Image (spheres, coloured by chain):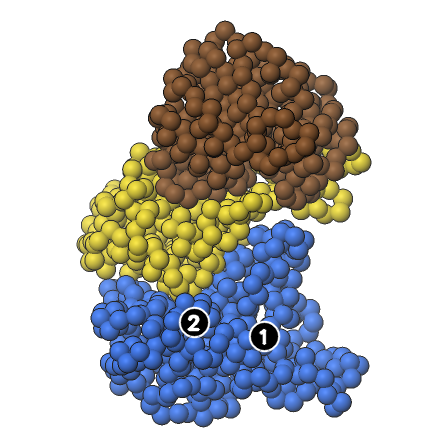
Chain colours: A blue, B brown, C yellow
């Protein structure tokens, strides 16, 4: 259950459209079912009333759209941002990807989003997904009503939520939360405890499923290159398919390296992967290492911060020490 | 176990002659390693040429089918593969497969007709095959007019063949034009669409149009102004292709595949296609 | 019709796999997936595999030919084809139908011999659906998921699998399994089919109608203003095309191993920005045109070239996997006017 009601969000958006503060609103549009919402742009109150939705499936991060829509807007574009989204927002601002003056951020508290694929593991023929007394109730064609614990069907990134506190907004609806002490590095630690061979086998198995659809790259708020090296025929590494298994691993590893210090751990890569590859674990390993080597750093916590990896200080770890500590971890 | 025999697998071609036409166009003569033509084709059809490791692309076959000894390709340097082709020396092997696409209806609709060929720049390449076919079977066609223009004198493709052969033929009028004045040029100066209107052809002709999209657009409008109907005008189109056989799915305009249903289209047929080319 | 009790299914798989490669759907961390039967794997009960079954005939990558380049000379090393038969067990009706759609492309003149070779050697054992998902809309395209056909058609009940040969190829395979199976009458199967058909009537997408689309409708839909809003949040990834059983666009690329050049074919996506890019321009400059191409191809262009048959089988994979939940159903409803 989310704290703010759909009606309150529509009222806020309609008011900002009506008083001319903004000329377009990025929000979520309802789908065929309760769980298949789509990011969309709304320009009128009628559109909002007919199609706007705010529920437990509004997980999509709007970062990729803010840039595009801000360019189109003649006044400002309004975006509803959940706490985790605001980190991506700040990171994009840090990289000068859009003009802050062109965007009006309405912060929305988030109680965690559900993962429809987890629900589908326990329910087939879903007619509706609602909430009763803090539990998720799924009405099905075959087994009637199924009641699930919210914690069991929460998206991974929400179960390991790093912050209920917005890192940016122009206006906040509802109550502000706190930065959380998340358990998000537990899975990384499990990987670190593996032997190199076990870890290699783990990633070999996970990455072998990749179908190179580029969903992870295209949704990633940190992947903002105008022309990706993997799409550029002149780069020599452009490819649409696995030419060999080594090359395939390189795609994901290079991508992970490229977003180091800029990845806010929003988890979109894993959410969109059609092959359920836990891509976020690659990025989290980097975040954990940065934290360990250079001190705690959260990309997007504030605008203009320099990631330790691109910010030289005299206290920085010597490369030899980094290697040593890496080996201790391995 | 046996060998897969598929139309996607090319044969070897040997480049036996390279002619420099213009600063950015070269004409390559290609035969198989045993000195034969790789395959027969009809005027307007294309072939896939490739340098393994560099790429493969579709080119119109510029020599006439009546040439039984070799094929020729006039190629403008504009991308990665064409750059490589331009750097080749005689004796280089390439790969070739084809023929692909439909052809100009030289043995049906065109028979007995007065022909008007209009080309701009490298656009002469696909028409050269048809022009030489019509010259070979001269009696099957009426009067032939050729309007050909380029940026400059140096950019006229096949200039030597035009001067040495085409203008000397009976019943063929060649009208050349260049975009801007040049001291050594005594011919017409001006853009092709305007020149066509100035020449004011009688409308009892079949016109074939090839060149940059903007030239095609204005020439077609000009032809209509002087009374041509779109059903009398043919053109040939180009889109990105990979397979050449209507399967890889990228060269379609609406439900038509340029590689298979084209590249030759009558202009009234082009009108029926959605505007996505 | 023959039948085998569920507890003997492993024996059936063992028997088939002793003669030819056998693929069955199995459950994995990434959902159901066809895997080669190794004597221990259990058949998944999932409604469908995450990736479609088109991989068997049109794999994501395949080598077409190798070249050895030395100085000015090129040597062509042809590809040797496999002549072994293989059996794919448990293919749903939508995927069975998708082969027909792919056939119309790859087996049309000139025949794609790489594809044909696999089709010739592949034996399809289908599996009737009993518990369709809310995302299923095969019936929109006239597909009967309770009669999936293939070379052998199977129906799984609570205690047995019923098998019926539908082609000569299937009859030959089924006959070779006679020692394990027994004759059966169709009553149990018919009862189950009737029950499933009732479920299909109740599916949320049961009323989805494709009749607004089809042969010759290019001009009616091409310039529809709705394409812009429908495509506005499309990320331009290839997920829908790669999980789709009927998407068949491909690219041909060269890979230089350092010793030789491998020319391979791989899946491509019309959703990608470089799909139609040429040295001198691109006819589909924005995601609006690319998005439109994909759906026009399935709903209009393909039917125009194939006697009205649609290029979609209603499997619902794109609905389940699109990162932003845009899909052919939403397109059909928006453009075709049915709600």
The residue beneath circle 2 is A70
Residue A123 x, y percent position in the rendering? 32, 68
Looking at the image, is C176 positioned above or below residue A67? Answer: above
The quadrant holding residue B17 is top right
What residue do we see at 34% from left, 68% from top? A41
Please tell me whether mark 1 or mark 2 is closer to you in this view. 2
Label 1 neighbour load within 10 Å: few <14, some 14-19, many 20+: many
Residue A118 found in image quarter: bottom left
Q: Nearer the viewer, residue C215 or A169?
A: A169
Give neighbour class at mark 2: few <14, some 14-19, many 20+ (Cα, 10 Å): many
Q: Gap between marks 1 and 2, in whole Å?
A: 28 Å
Closer to the N terminus: mark 1 or mark 2?
2
Residue A319 showing in the rendered view: yes
Query: Residue at 53% across / 73% down in the picture?
Result: A97
Q: Is residue A283 left or right of residue B226?
A: right
User: Which image quarter holds the N terminus of chain C?
Assistant: top left
In terms of secondary structure, where does tag 2 sit? helix
Q: Does the rendering let one see residue B60?
A: no
Q: Which mark is residue A134?
A: none
Give me the chain letter of mark 1: A
Note whether C121 is above or below C13 in the view shown. above
Where C137 sits versus C280, above or below?
below
**Displayed quadrant of residue B110:** top left
Q: Residue at x 26, y 86 (%)?
A: A133
Write down the residue under mark 1: A283
């Amino acid at each position: 259950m989310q704290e703010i009601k759909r009606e309150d969000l529509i009222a806020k958006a309609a008011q900002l459209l009506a008083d001319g503060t903004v000329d377009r609103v990025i929000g979520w549009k309802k789908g065929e079912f309760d769980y298949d919402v789509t990011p969309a742009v709304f320009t009128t109150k009628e559109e909002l009333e007919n199609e706007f939705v705010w529920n437990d499936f509004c997980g999509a991060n709007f970062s990729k759209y803010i840039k595009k829509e801000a360019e189109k807007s003649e006044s400002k574009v309004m975006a509803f941002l959940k706490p985790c989204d605001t980190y991506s927002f700040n990171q994009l601002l840090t990289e000068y990807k859009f003009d802050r003056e062109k965007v009006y951020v309405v912060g929305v508290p988030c109680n965690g989003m559900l993962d429809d694929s987890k629900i589908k593991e326990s329910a087939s023929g879903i007619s509706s997904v609602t909430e009763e007394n803090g539990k998720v109730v799924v009405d099905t064609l075959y087994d009637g009503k199924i009641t699930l614990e919210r914690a069991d069907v929460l998206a991974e990134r929400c179960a390991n939520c790093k912050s209920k506190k917005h890192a940016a907004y122009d206006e906040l609806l509802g109550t502000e939360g706190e930065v959380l002490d998340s358990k998000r590095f537990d899975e990384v630690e499990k990987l670190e405890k593996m032997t190199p061979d076990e870890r290699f086998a783990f990633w070999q198995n996970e990455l072998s499923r990749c179908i190179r659809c580029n969903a992870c790259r295209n949704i990633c708020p940190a992947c903002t290159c105008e022309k990706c090296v993997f799409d550029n025929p002149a780069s020599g590494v452009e490819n649409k398919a696995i030419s060999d298994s080594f090359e395939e691993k390189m795609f994901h590893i290079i991508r992970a390296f490229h977003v180091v210090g800029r990845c806010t751990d929003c988890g979109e890569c894993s959410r969109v992967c059609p092959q359920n590859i836990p891509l976020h674990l690659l990025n989290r390993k980097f975040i954990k290492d940065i934290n360990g080597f250079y001190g705690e750093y959260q990309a997007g916590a504030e605008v203009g911060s320099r990631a330790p990896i691109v910010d030289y200080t005299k206290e920085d770890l010597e490369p030899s020490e980094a290697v040593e500590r890496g080996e201790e971890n391995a | 176990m046996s060998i897969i025999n598929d139309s996607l697998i090319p044969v070897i071609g040997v480049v036996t002659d390279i002619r420099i036409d213009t600063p950015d166009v070269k004409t390559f003569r290609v035969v198989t390693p045993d000195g034969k033509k790789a395959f027969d084709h009809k005027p307007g059809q294309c072939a896939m040429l490739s340098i393994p490791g560099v790429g493969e692309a579709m080119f119109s076959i510029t020599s006439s089918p009546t040439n039984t000894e070799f094929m020729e390709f006039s190629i403008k340097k504009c991308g990665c593969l064409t750059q490589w082709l331009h750097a080749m020396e005689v004796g280089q092997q390439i790969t070739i497969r084809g023929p692909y696409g439909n052809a100009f209806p030289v043995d049906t609709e065109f028979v007995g007709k007065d022909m008007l060929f209009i080309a701009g720049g490298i656009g002469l390449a696909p028409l050269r095959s048809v022009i030489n076919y019509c010259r070979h079977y001269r009696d099957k066609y009426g009067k032939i007019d050729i309007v050909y223009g380029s940026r400059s004198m140096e950019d006229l493709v096949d200039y030597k063949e035009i001067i040495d052969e085409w203008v000397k033929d009976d019943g063929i009028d060649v009208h050349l034009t260049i975009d801007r004045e040049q001291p050594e040029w005594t011919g017409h100066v001006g853009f092709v669409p305007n020149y066509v209107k100035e020449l004011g052809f009688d409308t009892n002709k079949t016109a074939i149009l090839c060149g940059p999209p903007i030239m095609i657009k204005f020439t077609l409008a000009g032809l209509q102004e002087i009374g041509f109907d779109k059903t009398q005008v043919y053109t040939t189109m180009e889109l990105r292709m990979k397979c050449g056989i209507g399967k890889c799915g990228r060269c379609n305009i609406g439900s038509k595949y340029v590689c298979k249903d084209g590249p030759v289209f009558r202009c009234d047929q082009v009108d029926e296609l959605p505007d996505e080319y | 019709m023959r039948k085998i009790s569920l507890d003997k299914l492993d024996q059936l798989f063992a028997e088939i796999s002793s003669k030819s490669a056998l693929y069955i759907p199995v459950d994995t961390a990434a959902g159901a997936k066809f895997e080669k039967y190794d004597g221990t794997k259990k058949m998944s009960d999932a409604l469908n595999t995450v990736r479609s079954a088109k991989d068997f005939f049109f794999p994501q990558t395949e080598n077409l030919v190798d070249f050895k380049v030395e100085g000015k000379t090129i040597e062509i090393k042809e590809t040797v084809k496999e002549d072994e038969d293989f059996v794919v067990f448990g293919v749903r009706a939508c995927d069975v139908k998708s082969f027909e759609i792919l056939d119309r492309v790859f087996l049309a003149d000139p025949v794609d011999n790489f594809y044909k070779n696999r089709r010739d050697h592949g034996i399809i054992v289908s599996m009737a659906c009993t518990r369709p998902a809310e995302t299923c809309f095969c019936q929109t395209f006239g597909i009967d998921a309770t009669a999936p056909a293939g070379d052998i058609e199977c129906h799984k009940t609570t205690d047995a699998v019923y098998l019926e040969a539908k082609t000569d190829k299937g009859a030959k395979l089924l006959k070779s399994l006679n020692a394990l199976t027994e004759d059966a009458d169709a009553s149990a199967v018919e009862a189950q089919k009737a029950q499933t058909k009732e479920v299909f009537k109740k599916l949320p997408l049961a009323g989805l109608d494709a009749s607004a689309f089809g042969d010759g409708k290019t001009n009616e839909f091409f310039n529809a203003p709705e394409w812009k809003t429908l495509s506005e949040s499309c990320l331009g990834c290839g997920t829908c095309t790669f999980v789709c059983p009927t998407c068949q666009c491909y690219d041909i690329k060269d890979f230089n191993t350092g010793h030789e050049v491998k020319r391979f074919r791989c899946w491509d996506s019309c959703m990608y920005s470089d799909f139609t890019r040429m040295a001198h321009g691109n006819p589909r400059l924005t995601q609006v045109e690319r998005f439109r191409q994909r759906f026009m191809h399935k709903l209009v262009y393909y039917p125009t070239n194939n006697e009205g048959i649609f290029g979609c089988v209603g499997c619902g994979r794109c609905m389940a996997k699109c990162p932003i939940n845009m899909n052919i159903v939403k397109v059909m409803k928006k453009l075709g006017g049915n709600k």
